[in-house]
Image (tube, rainbow, N blue to C red):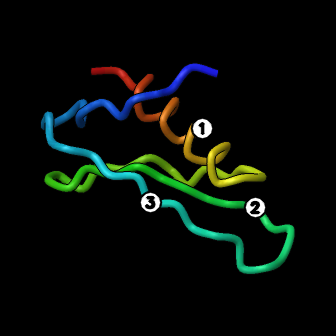
Amino acid sequence: MEELKLKPCPFCGGKARIAAIAPRLEGGAWTSYIFCRYCSVSTISVAGKTRDESINRSLKKWNERAQ
């Protein structure tokens, strides 16, 4: 699988961060979202069975947004 890189914020060009949240219950889904440190824009939370799956889904949403 190709490694996805986090692009800068499409609105202000600022540096973005990834937040991954562990499941509360055993067997639960990981959730993650990406947000800009400067203008606070973010993606919606995305779920996945594993941490990597959730983060990759968030990265795709962030990187495919219109400029």
Looking at the rendering, in which quadrant would you find the C terminus? top left
Residue 57 numbered tag:
1
Q: Residue at x 67, y 43 (%)?
A: 53
Return the residue at label 2.
Answer: 29
Between the residue at mark 3 and the residue at mark 2, the CA separation in whole angstroms equals 14 Å
Label 1 to label 3: alpha-carbon separation: 12 Å
User: Vertically, is 14 above or below 64?
Assistant: below
Q: Could you say which quadrant of the image residue 19 lies in?
A: bottom left
Helix, strand, or loop for circle 1? helix
Label 2 to label 1, Cα distance in Å?
13 Å
Badge 3 vs badge 2, beta-carbon distance below 8 Å: no
Name which residue type carries label 3: Ala
Q: What residue type is disc 1 on?
A: Arg
User: Quarter of the image holding residue 56?
Assistant: top right
How many marks do you count on the picture? 3
Question: Which residue is labeled 3 in the image?
Answer: 19
From the viewer's perspective, is 31 left or right of 17?
A: right
Q: Amino acid at mark 2?
A: Ala
Disc 3, SS: strand
Q: Residue at x 44, y 23 (%)?
A: 64
| Residue at figure coordinates x 78%, y 52% from the top left | 49
Residue at the extreme bottom: 24
